[in-house]
Amino acid sequence: MDFLNGITLIANYILIPGLTYGSQLALGALGITMIYTVLRFSNFAHGELMSFGAMSSILLTWLFSDLGISAGILPTAIIILPIAIIITIVYCLIIDKFVFRFYRQQKSKSVITLIVSIGVMFFSGGLIRFIIGPGDKNFFDGERFILKAKTFKAFTGLNEGLAIKTTQGITIILTIILVALLFWFLNKTKTGKSMRAYSDNQDLALLSGINPERVVLITWIITGTLACVAGTLYGLDKSYKPFTYLHLVLPIFASAIVGGVGNPVGAIIGGFVIAFSELIITFAYKKIFFYLIPNEFTPNGLLQILSTDYKIAVSFVILVLVLLIKPTGIYKGKVI
Amino acid sequence: MQNKNHIFNLFCCMFFMFLLVGFFQSWNLALTIFNLCIISSIMSLGINIQWGNAGIVNFGVMGFAALGGLANVIISMPPTNKAWETGGIYIILGLTIFIVSIIFSVVLWKRTAFSNKQKYLITIFIITFSYFLMRYIIDTPIKAIESIEPAKTGYLGGFNLPVIISWPIGGLLAALTAYLIGKIALGLRSDYLAIATLGISEIIIYVLKNEDWLSRGVKNVNGLPRPVPYEIELQSKPWVTEIANLTKTSIPEMSSIIVKVSYSLLFVTILIVILFLLEVALKSPWGRMMRAIRDNEVSANAMGKDIKKRHLQVFIIGSAIIGIAGAMLTTLDGQFTPVSYQPLRFTFLVWIMVIIGGSGNNFGSVIGGFIIWFFWIQSEPIGLWLVSFITSQISDSNLVKIHLLENAAHMRLMFMGIILLATLRFAPKGLIPEEKR
């Protein structure tokens, strides 16, 4: 029984939050990876793209709840997601047309494009705050929990409860669907193959008659979709604040780099590695030891490796360590 | 020669802007902006020598500036004697053990002939072991220190020295950190280096936010001593009253203007010294070598230049300059607030200054610092004016108008983005392009 209690505790505080946060990071990292492999620059504006997606979802949610449309037990954000995605994609394409295309045609160095993306980051950040304001917005509606801690306790008779929030469930399921679609697209369709060919060797791809503008267009469509979904899910799960998305850029970059920049599988693995290490390192293990070890041996402290204040710093430490020891990441990506 | 005229004109324009602010808003505001402009200029000089002259992408401005701020606390605050008695020794002991173990593992890594796998295992073992040993030694004393009058002290305090010493010390602290970062991260290419330095600077801020025994964390250190007299002291001086009467301003306003002018004089002196040193350095053979390395690493390497060492050198110099500026900023604020260090305000804004001013030209960075900081502050009123101008036809009770007016202050980010994008697109060399030598 004690053993089961311990397991439940880990599932409740590490496994489920880790899967959720990991999914959000993975979706973000996939976006960065797509841009990096095809357009060859590190997109610092990706956090703001996510924020833009989340903002569109919020505005549409407000609109729909004014119209009296809701998704029942699910949050309204789910039904408006396709429209929000389209808005984000349009925004990405406008940015690309007016900003990034010029540098692509000039064949600028990747550092220059990186600085350009910082300009886009500033502009988008300002635009978002101008439209929706800097405050905290909570746009979650519908049933809060899939599984309540109380129900779980009553059902199993354990001391520890296991709670699954609706947002957590949605995040994990949507991520699985999106990732499956993305991999099917990249590996099975002709367009996906042409994209991979283009990212592998641009000159050769041009010679074989692949239209570069089309590849770029599709890349932005994929990136916009991923950014919008990731941003909306993050906003649903925590709460939406334009400010937090700037701070999300670094963990996302960390995920992409840990997994290996330029490798989609790596981006997903990296997201989960970052999410779980943040949780594992800052978790207070006292309660688990309380269940697993006879009481008289239980130590006094909280048994935390690092205090929870350092949660996000953990991802930066991992990022730096990976850059130093194995800059190519877990799955060998491209070395910048 | 044309370049010199151009620089002169730009600085005149800037001076004129300050006069405008002085006449139409207030002289106090003009001087506040001016002081911060100088600090921004010094920071962008630090980035300029790294990016403009050596091609190193350093996104860690925030971290180095914060270290300069920390130097203020360590140098100028009075020591908390009780804290030192309860646990100072233990903390020093714990940190020493951890640092020695890291040095030991670095030596082990470089000097021994173990296989890579063995090295990893040994290093991980040593560092984990010493980490937990350190935590065991310092955890209790830290709690004890933080519980000593937490509302007032709750930290170790500093050395109670004049605050002006903290400026060079801040530079030194930043230089030391830059040495460590450079040693491990400079091998990375541009994009990765940018992300790595950004990450490291975030880690520095996290440490400053959470290690209360060192910097009081989010409780801030208030009441840092000043290198200039206090307003209250000035107000009782007869000569201040005389000047105030002559210029027809109130005595409190005059005293705060005098304080700000004395800060300005101090800062301008430092700016001129740093600018002079940098100009000399860049005109010397050393500067030529740096540019050669920037333009073509391979050929510079073939000519026998030690690229790694030069990069490390310039990284340290630039970071030290940022550290000095960070220390000056904290002295000007009079308090050390770790929460106020945001990458947007420090790192990215300083980068915009360098790009706009003209990377590779020191005068460009100075004018870039002035212009961007000026607009960063003034874009709030400008944005408000712009929005009310555009919406002037709409009635005042319109919800959209109210919303837009409320959020107009956030136009500054948009302005900055547009300025940066426009510069990169239409004048990628900046306002004052790099001199052709």
Image (cartoon, coloured by chain):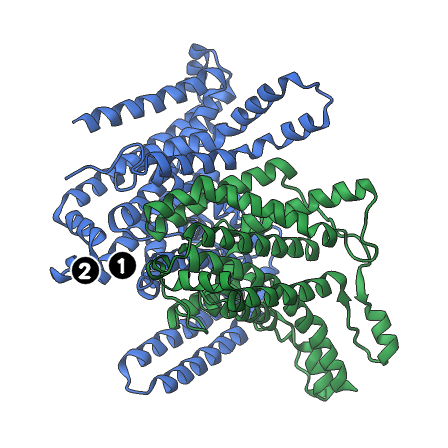
Chain colours: A green, B blue
Residue, disc 2: B298
Residue at 53% from the left image edge and 54% from the top image edge: A223
Residue at 15% from the left image edge and 58% from the top image edge: B299
Residue, disc 1: B312
Q: Does residue B273 appear left or right of residue A78 in this picture?
A: left
Q: Amino acid at mark 1?
A: Leu
| Residue A251 visible within the image | no
SS type, badge 1 = helix
Relative to the observer, which residue lies in front, B264 or B350? B350
Residue B120, located in which quarter of the rendered image?
bottom left
Residue at 43% from the left image edge and 65% from the top image edge: A320
Q: Does residue A269 appear left or right of residue A291 in this picture?
A: left
| For marks 2 and 1 on the same chain, the one whose residue lies earlier in the sequence | 2
Q: Position of residue B88 (x, y in %)?
A: 48, 65
Up the image or down, A65 lies above or below B91; here it is: above
Q: Quadrant of the C terminus of chain A?
A: bottom left
SS type, badge 2 = helix
Up the image or down, B80 lies above or below B256; here it is: below
Q: Position of residue B151 (x, y in %)?
A: 62, 51
Q: Position of residue B305 (x, y in %)?
A: 15, 60
The span from disc 2 to disc 1 (Cα, nearest Å) is 17 Å
Chain of the residue under label 1: B
Residue A289, located in which quarter of the rendered image?
bottom right
Relative to the observer, which residue lies in front, B402 or B275? B402
